[in-house]
Image: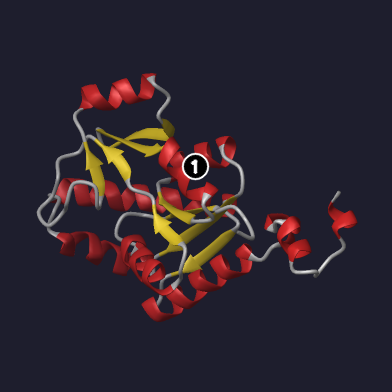
Amino acid sequence: MSRNGMLVILSGASGVGKSTLCKHIISSIPDIQLSVSYTTRPIRSGEEHGREYWFVNEETFRRMIDQQAFLEWAEVYGNLYGTPRRELMQLQDTGIDVILDIDIQGAKNVMTNAEDVVSVFLMPPSLEVLKSRLEARGTDDAEVVERRFQKAQTEMAHHVEYEYTMRNGSLEQAIREFESIVLAERVRTKRLDHAWLSRYGLIDKEVIE
């Protein structure tokens, strides 16, 4: 193995296209997975326990907090969301990169508490397109849609806290840009296992001792 896996944070407003982008990246790049978070929100039509989220009740979630099972957790729109710590570490130890599709609050906690994190913020094509996407979902009433839309405008100001900012103007372009970020970050010198280079005779063993 040439390196440990890294954590790739992907943040952006609801409806900006994060889930769609993640699905394409996972299918096009080897050795990368999407972190499956725990949540107390109700399961939606078409979702599957363990695929989109691990759906648990609040009592179970609170117990996991007490057990320090989460790398980060937050309350969003009255529901609890948490990123499992042990599962992420196991994947990283085997050289798997993990995408965290999390909000700004969770992203800040991960950036503070975890090592080897790459952060990406995804912008919508425009506010008008974002509003229409939120309305077209059909999963929330008008009041919730408006609240999400207002929050999105506040969230976008935080893009300066991320290493990369992308605009999802077209899915094809967004895929190429996200792939480029992941592939470039994988070969950063700081992430290389220099003993691995030595085994291939590419550097002198004494250099890494």
Compared with 45, 199 (above or below) is: below
Q: In the rendered image, which quarter is residue 34 located in?
A: bottom left
Q: Residue at x 73, y 55 (%)?
A: 190
Towards the viewer: 173 or 70? 70
Query: Looking at the image, which residue sits at the far left?
Result: 45
Residue 105 in the image, given as x and y percentages of width and height: 45, 39
Towards the viewer: 92 or 51? 92
- Element marked by disc 1: helix
Q: Residue at x 27, y 62 (%)?
A: 131
Disc 1 residue crowd, few under 14, some 14–19, many 20+, Cα 10 Å = some
Q: How is the structure coloured here?
A: secondary structure
Residue 152 in the image, given as x and y percentages of width and height: 37, 52
Q: What residue would you read off at disc 1? A: 89
Image-based side of 141 in relation to 187, left or right: left
Compared with 72, 176 (above or below) is: below
Q: Residue at x 80, y 69 (%)?
A: 201
Towards the viewer: 140 or 72? 72
Q: In the rendered image, which quarter is residue 64 located in?
A: top left
* Amino acid found under the numbered disc labelled 1: Met
Compared with 179, 5 (above or below) is: above
Image-based side of 50 in relation to 22, left or right: left
Residue 187 in the image, given as x and y percentages of width and height: 66, 66
Image-based side of 195 in relation to 50, left or right: right
Picture mark count = 1
